[in-house]
Structures are given as C-alpha cells and as structure tokens.
Image (cartoon, rainbow, N blue to C red):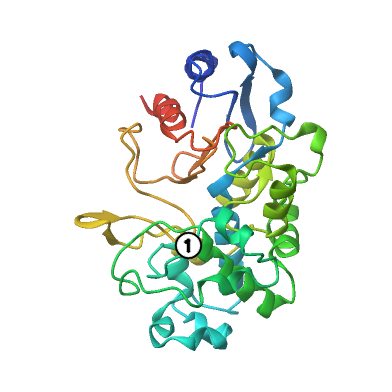
Amino acid sequence: MDISEKLFARAAEHTRSFVLGGNLPSAVLAVGNRQDLQYCQGFGKDGAEDDSLDRKIFLLASITKTFAGVGVARLVDRGMLDYEDRIVKYIPEFANRDWHKKITVGSVMTHSTGLATPDFATMLEMGYGVADSYKCVFDTEMVYEPGARMAYSTYTYQLLNEIVFRLTGMRMGKYLREEVFEPCGMPDTAFYPVDKARAMPVVDMFVKTQEAVDKFAELEASGAGCWSTVRDLYNYGKTVLTPGKLMQPETFEKMIRPQPLPRFNEEGFSRRTWGWNREPQAAFPLMPKSGFYHGGATGGVLWLDPARDFVFVFLSNRWSAGNDQAFSTLNMFYE
C-alpha cells in the first residue's frame, strides 16, 4: 500500500485526539509493508509527541493469541498436529468427562470449546502456575455443545501451552521465543517486560499489585500475556506476510481462513480463524476481506493485509480501553 506523508499525518492527528480527549493514556501508531516500516509516531501525556514510545514495551493482551496461533501453525506445517485433532490425543487425562473428547485444537482458537473458564484473577487466587494452569478447565460444566457456537474465552489457550510442551518439551515462553520471536526479529517480546525501565504502566490493570503482575507473567498466558513494542510487532507482521518465511503458503492460507460458527446467537456468525480474527468492526466500515487482525484489551490492534502489502500497528496502555480508536484510525488508510 502506498501511504503518503499527508495521509499518515492525518491518521496520527486522529490518534493524538484520543490521548487529548482522555480516552487513552498514550498511543503509538506505525504502518509499513514487507520491506519497510514507513511511519511511526507516538503520543504521550497531554497528547504531546513522544518519539520514545516506539521503544516502549506495552502489554499486548489478546494480540498474544496470534503468537500462539503462528506457533501452532508451525507445528501443523511440520505435520506434528492438526487443527482437527482432539485435545485428548495430546492430553489423555482431559478425557475425565466424555464431552471433553469432542474438543479440538482448532476450537480453542475459534472460541468454540464449550468450556466454562475462570478469569485470570480468580485463577491466580487458586494458586495455579505455569506447569498446571491448563488443569483449571478439567472440572468445569459444559456451557454449550463443543463446536456449536462461539463464546470468547482466553483461559482455554492454556490447553495449547500444554500441548506445545508435550510435543516439543518446551514451555510456551521458550517455544515462542525460538519459533516466533527470534525468526521474526522481536528482541523485546516476551511474557514479561524484558526491560522494566521501558515498560508502560497498565492503567486500570485487572491485577493491582506488583506481586500479582509477576504471577500473571509467570503463567505464560498465551491468550493474553505478552509484552512487546510497536517495532517488534511490525517486524512480526511483515514476517508473517512474507510467503514461505514461517510456514508453507498452504498452511498460511489454512491459518487465516475464517471458520464460520454461530456467534452468541443464530443471527450472527463468527469469522474467527485459527489464531486470528476477520469479523467486521463497526469502527472500520471500509474493512476489506483481504485483511486479518487481532485486538487486545489494552487498546491495541495488529492488522495485516497481504493483498495490499500493509502492516498496521496501534498500541496503548489502558485495560478495557476497547479497540474502536484503533479501528477508526485504521479505516482512514482505506478511504
């Protein structure tokens, strides 16, 4: 996509407006293609331009799910697992309830497992850690028939952590570092801020003490826990879009293909993919069918459009900020 300096300036001013208006405590916007990071601009206190924000480390929240999605896709690419495989194939003890036998690897990423899951704050209070957190879903009741609908769930991603561990012998943090972060040129991305001096404080974080924040990081929450910079996410985006770089083209197409499932009720249908999202967004009315994305609870959005060779990154640092600010900014690049 050919982005003019004038267009980026308009989009950057739009981004600044959210900080000036108090919607976001900070915001950083970056756009590029497979070759170059073309523009990057950050806005800090009172909407002032802050060039240091491109090096700051933000909690990504659910954008983390794409890392797990790409990590799983690399295993699919090697023939080590398939999206249609049942969870019990890799975690036999998960068959403690008959209906668990219906749940697939792919259904975790399309949010269609039927599992009831606790929030992370509750789970931390229950004392689960990195080695056993996946067990927290073993004894929950069935919310709906597996595969029958879509109901967003983050904690179920811990099942993927355990599958990765049993297949590779690596915990998710190490696996993602070796299989995703290092190949993509992401030195500042991990389940904890690699440099606490550059970490952006998360306003209204669901855990309030540093001890709780540290315990959350130790869980290696592959659905919500990674920290990163805007430049790392750009490097990630351009690598994902480079044919053959991380996986074969046919695996890439499989990973980003929408898996239609009823969404909340029979009037709407989910367009989640195995690790990404392609559902329409009201704040992004010009959204083309060629792109895919994921947002995060801290206000961020990563959008990739292979047809237009376009990488869009928007990050902020308020928990439950929503993604409309990012999507309305993204919409400007398609006007």
User: Three-letter amino acid code at disc 1?
Assistant: Met
Residue picked out by circle 1: 255
Please tell me which residue is depicted at 55% across the width and 78% down the height of the picture. 81
Q: Is residue 166 left or right of residue 100?
A: right
Is residue 77 among what the camera can see?
Answer: no
Q: Look at the image and tell me whether residue 218 can be seen.
A: yes
**Considering only vertical position in the picture, is 162 above or below 234?**
below
Q: Is residue 182 left or right of residue 252?
A: right
Between residue 275 and residue 247, name the one nearer to us.
275
Camera-side residue of 208 and 205: 208
Q: Disc count in the image?
A: 1
Residue in the picture at 47% in, 54% down:
276
Q: In the visual, does 180 lie left or right of 155?
A: right
Percent x, y of residue 189: 72, 47
Q: Residue at x 78, y 32 (%)?
A: 198
Q: Position of residue 46 (x, y in %)?
A: 60, 11
- Residue in view at x 48 percent, y 87 percent: 95
SS for tag 1? helix
Residue sitting farthest toward the front: 125
Residue 288: percent from the left, percent from the top? 35, 40
Residue 131: percent from the left, percent from the top? 70, 71
Along the viewing direction, whichever of 61 and 202 lies nearer the viewer: 202
Characterize the local packing of mark 1: few (<14), some (14-19) or many (20 or more) Cα atoms within 10 angstroms.
Answer: many
Q: Quadrant of the C terminus?
A: top left
Which of the 4 image quarters holds residue 71? bottom right
Between 91 and 287, the one nearer to me in the picture: 91
In the rendered view, would you say 25 is above or below 70?
Answer: above
